[in-house]
Structure formats: C-alpha cells, structure tokens
C-alpha cells in the first residue's frame, strides 16, 4: 500500500495500479521535486530531509527512518552531501534499489574549490585550520567533487532520464508514463535554462560574495564569477582573520552584492562588508521557502536567478 508523502505533495492517481507503484524515498527537496515530476499521474515520493535542515549533519526522525526503510528505491545525491544516510542505506532490504545521482553517467562534477586562495596571505593559515576542524568534526572533508550538483540544470536533465529508467524497471506497467513525464520535464528545463542564461547575462563581470561556496554549479553554467565567500563551508564559522582578509578583498574591488542564505546569520555579512556600498540579497540552494513538490526545482532556479538579477540592477 502506497504511503502518503512526508510533505504536503499532491498525488494524482490517473488510473494507476496503486499496489504496483514503487515506494520511493528522496533525500533533499530539489531531488524530491525531480522525482515528483517523473511520477506525476502515478504516485508521489517521500521527502526524507525536512525543509530548512542542513543536509550535511542530520538526525532522522522515526517517521523519516520508517519511510527510508520501507522504500523500494532511494534517490539521493550521494554520501558527499548526506554522509549520515550511508548507515541507514546499508540496512535496506536486499531488494531495495539505490540511485546515487552523483554516480550517474553524464553528471557534470566540479571539484571543491577554495576561493580563499584569492584572498590575502594573512587569512590563509586560519582558513586551513578551520577547514581541518570541519573535517574532524563532521567526518567528511572538502576534497573531491562538490556535492551541490543539482544547481546545474544540465545535471537535472540527465537525472530525469535515469530516474524514469529506474522507476520503469520497478514498475513496467507505468513505464510509458514515467518516460513521457521525464521527457516533458527535460524539455521544460531546457527552455528554462535558455531563459535564465539570457536574464543572467547582465551579471557577467559583476562582483559579489556569498555566505559559503555552494553555487559553483550554477555559476559555471551561467558564467558568474564570485569574488569570495564568508565561510569555506556551510558547516564552519569564519574566524577574525578570514573576515579581515575578505574585507581587504572587498574594499575597492567593485563588489556590488553579498548573498546570504535563509538559515544563516546575516550579521557576518555586516562584518565582511563594513563601510562598503554593498547590498545584501538571499540565495536559497535547497528551496527552503518553497512548497515541496514537482514545481519546487524550477521555482528554485527562478528564485536564484531573480536574486542575481536584482543584484545586477542594483534593486
């Protein structure tokens, strides 16, 4: 029997056999959105990570653990984003499938970068010290591939195909609908990507800083160039030397904007841009302020683009 989603997602049952519909669990809201698009007219996936929570360090609620354990397939970004999911996934039923999106063929991957290399020498030693402490405290480091892969819409288009294929294997009766939905979603995303490229052309050459370096997939897709970040990661707190180095870099560099995130304290921005004519805007890489479901992923991209557009226009 198909369980209701953990979030208020609407399922449309277009004559599908309920007993045959796979039980699907997803990690974060953007992935849940992509799977929801493929499953439209058949069922709805479960969202494991509640909106607003950090994907890097999370304790499952009992209801979330049950949804994960009873899944026929789990679609997740990968261990680099949610290391805490590895252990629960090991105890899944032997018949349960796992689709790790970072491992999907055709996915564009970028290695972690350290924007502090562009900052003054006196901030570097503390940056690396903070980096090492983060590695020890959270059991993962910032080497290898950056896991914020969903922020490149080209990756999402690749994944839609693989999600449809995986669901079709589990549920052959609904395979034509899964594949039709995936194609429609790919077409919509391709159109959106072209539209965003035109809109974001005004940001090329505009200097900005962000809270942490989570956006390189979006930035490289749309030719945006950050000057620096407040924090090396969303799990570390910048120290005085790093903030001083960033202030030096911002001063006189033409930085126009600073981008915060919903879950972080904007006072750090004030310390980094003190005395500079820099406006603050918000970027939301997880869709915290959006309603979970099929529409969240395109809405997330639109909302991020709107923040960059506002920066370019000085609004």
Image (tube, grey):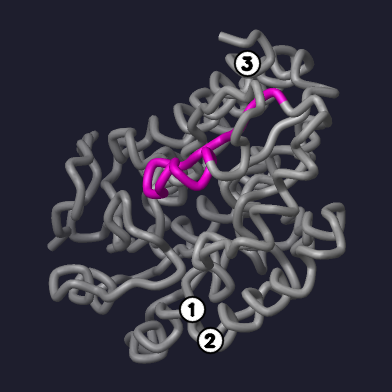
Give the residue number, with chain letter if any, for mark 1.
83
> Camera-side residue: 107 or 115?
115
The answer to whether the residues at label 1 and label 2 have Cβ atoms under 8 Å apart is: yes
Residue 200 location, x and y as percent? 71, 19
- Residue beneath the point at 14% across and 75% down: 62
What distance separates the C-alpha of mark 3 from that of mark 2? 37 Å
Q: 10 Å neighbourhood of mark 1: few (<14), some, or many (≥20)?
A: some
Q: Which mark is residue 139?
A: 2
Q: 10 Å neighbourhood of mark 3: few (<14), some, or many (≥20)?
A: some
Mark earlier in primary sequence (3, 2):
2
Provide the residue span drawn in magenta: 256-270
> Camera-side residue: 92 or 246?
246
Horizontal side of 240 relative to 124 (left or right) equals: left
- Residue beneath the point at 30% across and 50% down: 51
Q: What secondary structure is marked by label 3?
A: helix
Q: Is residue 238 above or below residue 210?
A: below
Horizontal side of 138 relative to 103 (left or right) equals: left
Q: Is residue 136 above or below residue 250?
A: below
The answer to whether the residues at label 3 and label 2 have Cβ atoms under 8 Å apart is: no
In the picture, residue 85 is in which quadrant? Answer: bottom left
Whether residue 101 is visible here, answered yes or no, is yes
Labels 1, 2: front one: 2
């Amino acid at each position: 029997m198909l369980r209701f989603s953990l979030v208020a997602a609407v399922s449309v049952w277009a004559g599908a056999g309920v007993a045959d519909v796979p039980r699907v669990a997803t990690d974060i809201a953007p992935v849940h959105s992509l799977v929801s698009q493929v499953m439209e007219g058949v069922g709805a996936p479960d969202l494991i990570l509640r909106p607003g929570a950090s994907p890097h360090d999370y304790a499952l609620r009992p209801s979330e653990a049950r949804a994960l354990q009873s899944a026929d397939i789990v679609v997740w970004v990968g261990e680099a984003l949610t290391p805490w999911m590895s252990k629960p996934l090991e105890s899944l039923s032997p018949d349960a499938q796992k689709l790790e999106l970072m491992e999907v063929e055709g996915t564009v991957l970028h290695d972690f970068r350290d924007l502090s290399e562009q900052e003054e020498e006196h901030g570097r030693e503390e940056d690396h010290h903070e980096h090492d402490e983060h590695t020890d405290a959270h059991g993962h480091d910032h080497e290898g591939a950056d896991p914020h892969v969903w922020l490149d819409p080209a990756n999402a288009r690749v994944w839609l195909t693989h999600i449809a294929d995986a669901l079709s294997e589990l549920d052959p009766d609904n395979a034509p609908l899964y594949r039709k939905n995936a194609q429609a979603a790919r077409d919509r995303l391709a159109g959106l990507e072209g539209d965003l490229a035109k809109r974001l052309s005004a940001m090329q050459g505009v200097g900005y800083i962000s809270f942490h370096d989570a956006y390189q997939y979006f930035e490289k897709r749309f030719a945006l160039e950050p000057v620096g970040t407040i924090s090396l990661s969303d799990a570390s707190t910048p120290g005085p030397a790093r903030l001083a180095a960033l202030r030096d870099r911002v001063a006189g560099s033409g930085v126009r904007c600073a981008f915060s995130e919903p879950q972080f304290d904007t006072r750090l921005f004030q310390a980094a841009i003190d005395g500079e004519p820099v406006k603050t805007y918000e970027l939301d890489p997880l869709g915290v302020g959006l309603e979970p479901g099929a529409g969240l992923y395109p809405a997330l991209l639109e909302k991020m683009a709107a923040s960059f557009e506002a920066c370019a226009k000085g609004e």
